Image (cartoon, grey):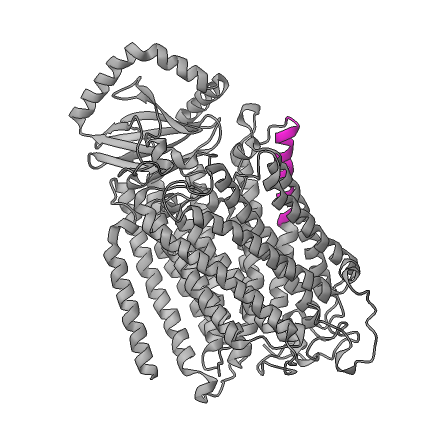
Amino acid sequence: MAAVHGDVHGHGHEDHHPTGIMRWVTTTNHKDIGTMYLWFSLAMFFTGGFLALGIRAELFQPGIQILEPEMFNSFTTLHGLIMVFGAIMPAFVGFANWQVPMMIGAPDMAFARMNLWSFWLLPIAASLLVSSFFVPGGAAAGGWTFYPPLSTQGGLGVDMMIFAVHILGASSIMGAINIITTILNMRAPGMRLMDMPLFVWTWLITAYLLVLVMPVLAGTVTMLLTDRHFGTSFFNAAGGGDPVLFQHIFWFFGHPEVYIMILPAFGIVSEIIPTFSRKPLFGYSSMVYATASIAILSCVVWAHHMFTAGMPTVGQLFFMYATMLIAVPTGVKVFNWTATMWRGAMTFETPMLFAIGFIFLFVIGGFSGVICAIVPIDIQVQDTYYVIAHFHYVLVSGALFALFAGAYYWLPKWTGHMYDETLGKWHFWLSMIFFNLTFFVQHFLGLAGMPRRIPDYALQFADFNMVSSIGAFGFGMSQLLFVYIVIKCIRSKEAAPEKPWDGATTLEWTHLPTPAPYHSFEKPPVFKPVSH
Amino acid sequence: MRNKSVATLIGMSVLALYSSMAVGSKYNFPEPQSTIAQDIYDQHIALLWICLAIFIGVFGVMFYSVLKHRKSLGYKAANFHHSTTVEVIWTVIPCLILIAMALPATKTVIAMKDTSSPDMTIKATGYQWMWGYDYLQGEGEGISFFSKLSTPRAQLENKEPKGENYLLEVDNNLVVPVGKKVRIILTANDVIHAWWVPALGVKQDAIPGFIRDVWFTADNPGIYRGQCAELCGKDHGYMPIVVEVLDEESYAKWAAGKLAGVSNSVVSLAAVSTDVVSSGAEQAIDAIEENLDNN
């Protein structure tokens, strides 16, 4: 985003930074790094999207048309890995980089060089993942969850995936440490923890989850690596190991991971809903407590991914009850958002549309989540398209829609230009329609008995698969519109108003000019707490 | 103008709902053929109604607010931002709803896990990419065969028209008698597979080196089709499960015929199984099986 130039509005100090490519290689500025995170995740979003469209093209009709089964499995595997680790997570870190310092009145992130390092690890990991398609044996094909013994069968592609996961994990841990340190130490004088904007709160809790679970993931992929090459038998029954052990460790990481991808989304939505309702967030402290409870509960529900792996009755019951319990704090959040909108004076610019779309569709994903939590029903829907539909409702219309909402909300602050409101609304409605066309029908496919991760299917699934594929292509194309809107916004000649959203109350809107200068809050702002 | 669009919207959603019902059972769970499958079916429908009620409640309020509390209508924002009473209420009510959901589910879980005193026991072994069945106990004890996809390759490659049971047909069906408690013991030879027959309400992972078990009692004779549900490599989509439920008399006849055939073909079958089954895994299975029986 070249338009993020410093020294606007006559701040009277120089921004010492190299120009051209060296600016991006050597920068320690949180805004530059945030920008790189966001562009990187957008590029990965389209890479993962390309794989998704490959999957949907193959599933357009029964029979094998364009992807042989092994290649199809590689597509589903890499689609999952790239979207989770390459698109959604880095995008939220990009938001944190841009917004956390500005929202707490800090001049930059606490560890500026580590910040740059944690970004530049990402392209390395991504190129490992993408280039694994071209090595002998092809890319990993054991699913994004890479359960052994299947994942011990693969070739070099699996090892490349393991190293990519190591690197991505290291990057995430560094990012998380940076965010925790920044939030705990660099808030403007007078800003107590319970005065922080909710986006900052959700990221603080998310960062703790990251520090807790990413090392677990690193451990489990290392065990997989030594099983593959150094003769250990952690996950090999013939050597005294247990394949199900892998699933326990993986999901001990994997379930909190789900909340790592959704809690910052809750944060973004909790900023946008009050702004466009022109009314303070309802139940600020219960929002904070709900976020914390979700994070804590997320650490004790992992085995609900494994109800069909077989476990004792009490085990199944415990994980069922614990999982259902998550619905309570999540429900509190939805009720609070509704109460925030109630008797507000709402306007419906694109960020608000995406935020409402988020709530609407995320709740559907929440319902199917409760249904999946019920062990007997999960026995039927586990590993079917029902589960695919469920987690795309929480990850696409959840996390991704919140990212879009946040991007439209803060684009004027970042670039100093307004995005095209009409096109933004088009983007929202096209995404909304095509998303549902793609994924709503997958609930029915799952109920009717279509397993996930199959390249070909029985004839009774043909009609809804065709509908889903059409929706997917529509959804993919609609996202090109987003790229166009962002580029148009950056290149626009027209300056955005100083405060385009009259209901905004956080520091970046009230205490900084638009666009935000290259160095902001070199002197900490005077923060006046509002009572919650 | 607004009323008109609201009316159109409601009309369209009613139409959409109605047509989705017309699609009917094809896109719901298959018709349940066992008490467990029936329980699952009923609980799912009950949950859908509960979700629908909550959905209408929450979004009724939200969309009323979206329509009425607009700046463009000149609505002035209120300034309230918390109320302990309502927050307690909307924490407690979901808890009660969840308890109501959990009670019947708990009963079903306990029933599902009770694999004790079966009328017959069959071992199912997952291979890349087919199933092996061994009748271990009960009528038909000693029967043993493999069950592979029987859809011709040409249909997969779109060179022939696809048959009615495309990808859901096998060379040897798993045959069981109606009304008997059948316990399936599961393991795998290479990677994890999952044995799933939706109409019987049974899904269980088959894990190499370990034994898991499930049970079902089929209510009616018929043919029930399922698929492997755990990604197991290249041909994961091509290892269906077909359970053929016969009345007692026909089953006895089938078993007798099969057993008579076994004595003739036992040599060839043994040759196949030493090829495919690693003896170490077999031994491990035997040991664990003893363990399972002791519990």
Q: Residue A26's x, y, as percent?
A: 79, 59
The residue located at (34%, 68%) in the rendering is B56
Q: Position of residue A504 (x, y in %)?
A: 60, 79
- Magenta highlight on residue A387: no
Please say whether residue A206 is visible from this viewpoint: no
Residue ID at (50%, 45%): A76
Compare residues A136 and A141 and report the one nearer the observer: A136
Looking at the rendering, the stretch of residues picked out in magenta corresponds to A213-231
From what the image shows, is residue B146 above or below residue A195? above
For the residue pair B141 and A442, the one nearer the viewer reads as A442
Q: Spot the residue most to the left.
A: B249
Which secondary structure is most common in the magenta stretch?
Answer: helix
Asked if one can make out residue A225 in the rendered structure from this viewpoint, the answer is yes
Locate the C terminus of chain B and report the quarter of the image it occupies.
top left
Residue A223 highlighted magenta (yes or no): yes
Quadrant in the picture for the N terminus of chain B: bottom left
From the viewer's perspective, tell me whether residue B205 is left or right of residue A3: left
Q: Is residue A30 above or below residue A211?
A: below
Residue sitting at x 55%, y 31%: A153
Question: Residue A463 location in percent, x, y?
Answer: 32, 51
Return the residue nearer the eye: A378 or A143: A143
Count the numbered circles shown: 0
User: Which picture quadrant has residue A453?
Assistant: top left
| Residue for point 52% across, 83% down | B79
| Left or right of residue B49, residue A360 in this image | right
Q: Furthest-bottom residue in view?
A: B74
Closer-to-camera residue (A196/B229): B229
- Residue A314, percent across and down? 43, 42
